[in-house]
Image (cartoon, rainbow, N blue to C red):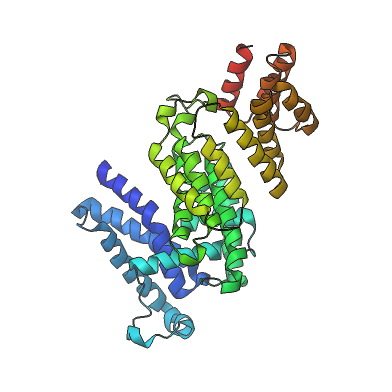
């Protein structure tokens, strides 16, 4: 197979794997999710072999769906699995004239199947870490190698985690269906949280695979937009999370140099910010205001929105400081407290920020010592240097260490 065809097949896998697994799993049940994965993987293997000899078909997606249908029916009819175990459990729909056993790869059914899979994967019965692994594998089509790299784990560890999670899907009898009306909101909160974690895993990733890092963010955004296209989950907080991701993703390319070195916000070239994503973020932020609830996503999205304006005005940093104050009251975390101190520094100066920073005492965080280095640099260079050296020792990746070393050299 030529390089061009290989790239097309890879893109198709990334785009269609999750759709096909979701449709097959919806039809035959989550207890057969691993079989669904195998069938779809085999379908792509046949595609690679066939297209390498005969060339790519005119409609490769339709070709994949046809082969997947054939393989699905063959597998479940074999050894009487279909007649004895599957058919009795299938819902009856007289309007389909007996075709309820054939995977339906129509656009509407694919969308519904993926949404139902999203709620199934993010079921509270499964641990948060396992939910993220399942989401990457089942909903985003990432391979085991890629997931292992994303979590800085061994393949065996990821395989065991996914096996336990899939076993939980079976033993807890988790169904692929939309939650009842009264459960939509609490279940959506968990789904949004997993999407938020997936995005952060990409945006603040420790992996050196920068393509993978960006792909993680894009997949999280795709899942968020998918939720916004379903009426019952198209809520203000859903739109707020999408806005937040758009604003952060707009500065993705400006955060690293051609040599993959990390670039701090204050040194970024605004011309590299993605204006289309910023505009999209503004649209979703506006949509998020249609309601009375103010979620943490609303507050973080507004902060991220301010960072899409390069000017360091007093209004900007005072508003950001107030937003962080509100965020801490709503959802306290040490990271938010640290970010608030930087906003305090920009709004009221080093002394006000230092007084609070020293009381925070986040000794295990290199970000904490980087901030202390910034606050001390114009007041006490020795303390600034000592803080940055501690930050260097704690930093986890070469790009972070390089950036800290630059700051040390600049003192």
Quadrant of the image for the C terminus?
top right
Q: Is residue 146 in view?
A: no
Total tally of numbered discs in the picture: 0
Which of these two is toward me, 338 or 76?
A: 338
Q: Position of residue 101 (x, y in %)?
A: 38, 79
Rendered position, 180 above or below 235:
below
Rendered position, 292 above or below 3:
below
Residue furthest bottom in the image = 94
Rendered position, 372 above or below 161:
above
Rendered position, 208 above or below 84:
above
Which of these two is toward me, 29 or 329?
A: 329
> Quarter-wise, where is residue 91 in the image?
bottom left
Q: Position of residue 264 (x, y in %)?
A: 54, 26
Q: Is residue 306 left or right of residue 60?
A: right
Residue furthest right in the image = 359
> Quarter-wise, where is residue 38 in the image?
bottom left
Q: Position of residue 355 (x, y in %)?
A: 78, 26
Q: Position of residue 316 (x, y in %)?
A: 57, 32
Taking the spot 44% from the left edge, 28% from the top edge, the residue there is 270
Q: Is residue 67 left or right of residue 236?
A: left
Q: Is residue 16 left or right of residue 217?
A: left
Taking the spot 29% from the left edge, 57% from the top edge, the residue there is 47
Which of these two is toward me, 397 or 273?
A: 273
Taking the spot 37% from the left edge, 80% from the top edge, the residue there is 100
Q: Is residue 239 in view?
A: yes
């Amino acid at each position: 197979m030529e390089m061009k065809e290989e790239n097309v097949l890879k893109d198709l896998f990334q785009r269609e794997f999750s759709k096909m697994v979701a449709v097959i799993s919806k039809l035959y049940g989550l207890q057969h999710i691993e079989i669904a994965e195998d069938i779809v993987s085999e379908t792509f293997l046949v595609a690679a072999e066939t297209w390498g000899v005969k060339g790519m078909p005119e409609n490769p997606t339709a070709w994949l769906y046809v082969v997947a249908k054939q393989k699905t029916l063959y597998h479940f009819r074999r050894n009487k699995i279909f007649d004895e175990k599957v058919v009795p459990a299938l819902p009856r729909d007289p309007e389909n004239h007996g075709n309820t056993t054939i995977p339906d790869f129509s656009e509407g059914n694919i969308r519904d199947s993926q949404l139902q899979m999203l709620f199934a994967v993010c079921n509270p019965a499964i641990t948060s870490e396992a939910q993220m692994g399942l989401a990457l594998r089942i909903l985003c089509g990432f391979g085991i190698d890629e997931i292992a790299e994303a979590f800085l784990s061994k393949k065996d560890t990821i395989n065991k985690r996914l096996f336990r999670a899939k076993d939980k899907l079976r033993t807890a009898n988790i169904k692929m269906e939309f939650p009842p009306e009264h459960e939509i909101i609490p279940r959506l909160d968990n789904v949004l949280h997993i999407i938020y974690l997936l995005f952060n895993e990409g945006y603040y990733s420790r992996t050196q695979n920068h393509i993978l890092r960006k792909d993680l963010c894009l997949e999280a955004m795709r899942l968020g937009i998918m939720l916004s296209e379903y009426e019952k989950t198209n809520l203000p907080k859903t739109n707020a999370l999408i806005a937040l991701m758009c604003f952060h993703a707009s500065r993705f390319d400006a955060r690293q140099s051609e040599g993959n070195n990390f670039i701090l916000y204050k040194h970024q070239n605004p011309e590299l910010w993605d204006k289309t994503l910023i505009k999209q973020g503004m649209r979703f932020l506006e949509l998020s205001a249609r309601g009375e609830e103010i979620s943490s996503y609303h507050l973080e999205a507004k902060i991220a929105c301010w960072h899409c304006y390069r000017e360091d005005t007093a209004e900007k940093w005072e508003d950001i400081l107030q937003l962080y104050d509100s965020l801490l009251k709503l959802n306290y975390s040490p990271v938010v407290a640290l970010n608030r101190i930087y906003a305090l520094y920009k709004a009221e100066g080093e002394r006000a920020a230092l007084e609070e920073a020293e009381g925070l005492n986040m000794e295990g965080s290199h970000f904490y010592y980087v901030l202390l280095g910034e606050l001390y640099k114009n007041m006490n260079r020795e303390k600034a240097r000592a803080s940055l050296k501690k930050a260097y020792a704690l930093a986890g990746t070469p790009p972070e260490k390089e950036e800290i070393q630059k700051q040390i050299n600049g003192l």
